[in-house]
Amino acid sequence: MNRLLITICGRAGSKGFKNKNLKVFCGKPLVYYSLSAAELFCRNHPELQIDLALNTDSEDLAKIVAAEYPEVVYLPRGVELGGDKVPKMAVYQDSLRRMEERTGAPYDWHMDLDITSPLRTAADIENAFALKQSRADLDLVFSVCEARRNPWFNMVKTVDDHVEQVIHSEFTGRQQAPDVYDVNASIYVFRRDFLAQNTDGMLWRGKIGVSVMMDTGIIDIDSEHDYLLMEAIAQHLYAHYPEFNAVRENIRGE
């Protein structure tokens, strides 16, 4: 049976938005949205051995998760992985190593779901995983959304005392430019060996595929403004898109 590790990773505190991982979002703990979406995905894959783990240095976050999702393995994060300068890759590797030691067997894939991206559907996870599963040549698949600006057409950079195109081109319409995407940091699916053998913490060393998500469904929560705006967007999505509401309705607890 193929084995998949799903992680939820969050550190204590935050410079941009204090204790953002402990926030309540639309009446439910923020972290529960990722756990609910993961649970819906797991139900659709009885053929897989799936383990869920929480990697954090926040005891408060660990208690919130344990209260309704006791099956999630708590991996207390060491001080060497604290702070905002530690690359995510190091935390993923730490989670993979410790869970393989705990279970006594290697995983085939490692998936991470970001806490501050609560507006994802079970289908979003399904699509990202299916792409990685179908493409053995890909080291990593991550979620993206279609970019609203294009560096070949309508983005500029500062050069001395003026601005220039980010990438020089003669395109007269955006449709002529190459397709570009915003990395929305919601879903990552790694080939196990690519993750385990990475030595510099960079995601870009491997061959990468992308899974496209709805662009208005994702705003990474890094400020109070992001949080309030995302709650407003969420209310619209819950009212008009059943697939988003299904994740909210599946959250455990009252």
Image: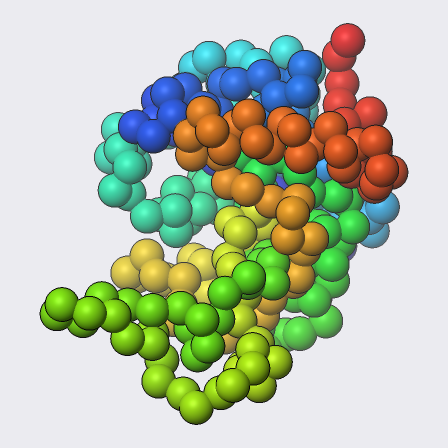
Whether 170 is drawn above or below 213: the answer is below
Instruction: Give the percent coordinates (x, y) of residue 204.
Output: 40, 68
Residue 109: image quadrant is bottom right
Tell me which residue sits at (58%, 17%) in the image: 24
Whether 233 is drawn above or below 185: the answer is above
Tell me which residue sits at (25%, 70%) in the image: 163
Instruction: Give the percent coordinates (x, y) of residue 126.
Output: 75, 53
Query: Quick check: can you spot residue 167?
Result: yes
Instruction: Give the percent coordinates (x, y) of residue 107.
Output: 59, 53
Query: Quick check: can you spot residue 111?
Result: no
Q: Nearer the viewer, residue 223 or 29?
A: 223
In the picture as drawn, the residue positioned furthest to the bottom comes out as 170
Whether 40 is drawn above or below 185: the answer is above
The reply, left or right, for residue 237 in relation to residue 118 is: right
The reply, left or right, for residue 97 in relation to residue 45 is: left
Residue 2: image quadrant is bottom right
Tell me which residue sits at (30%, 28%) in the image: 15
Residue 248: image quadrant is top right
The reply, left or right, for residue 84 in relation to residue 28 is: left
Tell me which residue sits at (75%, 23%) in the image: 251
What colour scheme does the image use? rainbow
